[in-house]
Amino acid sequence: MRPDTGAGTVLMLGLCGLIATVGVGTAALGVLYDTREKAATAAEAAALAAAVATHPPAADGAPDRLAAELAQRNGARLISCWCDVDTSLKTRVVAVTVALTANVPLFGEVAVGRTARAEFEPRVWLGR
């Protein structure tokens, strides 16, 4: 019997293990990237809705309620909303943070959070 008998089998098993590890790692990174982008979209939509709602004549409802609704429509949950109602015509900025849960292969559920800001200018909205 030759001393290198079976070496090809061990090499192939190692190569298959490496390919499987890289595949699972790539899938996990892909899921996390996709979830991060979805969370960013949800945060931006929620921030835009909340920004307009801070000026009562421009929208019906509380800004934080609208932000939560838009986040939920995009599959996320609202974590915080810095969006005070202001009846003046000055420019205001709101900040919204949302979280989205990703089911990452081999790691389970991972929460991904994103924050977005939006600016609303009532004077522009009124055409002044």
Image: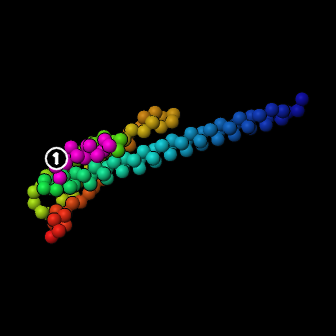
- Quadrant that contains the N terminus: top right
In the image, what residue type sits under mark 1?
A: Gly
Q: Is residue 96 magenta?
A: no
From the top left corner, tell me how far across and down residue 67 is, in percent.
Answer: 25, 47
Examine the rendered structure and indicate whether residue 34 appears above or below residue 128. Answer: above
Q: How is the image coloured?
A: rainbow
- Of residues 57 and 2, the one nearer the viewer is 57
Examine the rendered structure and indicate whether residue 118 appears above or below residue 113. Answer: below
Examine the rendered structure and indicate whether residue 5 appears above or below residue 62. Answer: above
According to the picture, the residue beneath numbered tag 1 turns out to be 61
From the top left corner, tell me how far across and down residue 42 is, in percent.
Answer: 33, 48
Examine the rendered structure and indicate whether residue 49 appears above or below residue 65. Answer: below
- Residue found at x 39% / y 47%: 38
- Residue found at x 68% / y 38%: 16
Q: What element carries label 1?
A: loop
Q: Give the range drawn in magenta.
A: 59-73
Q: Can residue 66 be seen in this view?
A: yes
Q: How many labels does the image show?
A: 1
Q: Does the magenta stretch include residue 62?
A: yes
- Graded by Cα atoms within 10 Å as few (under 14), some (14 to 19) or many (20 or more), the crowding at tag 1 reads few
Q: Would residue 2 appear left or right of 95 to someone viewing this image? A: right
- Quadrant that contains the C terminus: bottom left
SS majority, magenta:
helix
Most extreme residue toward the left is 87
Residue 119 lies in what quarter of the image?
A: bottom left
Q: Can residue 113 be seen in this view?
A: no
- Residue found at x 64% / y 41%: 19
From the top left corner, tell me how far across and down residue 6 is, in percent.
Answer: 80, 32
- Of residues 83 and 16, the one nearer the viewer is 83
From the top left corner, tell me how far across and down residue 95 is, in percent.
Answer: 25, 52
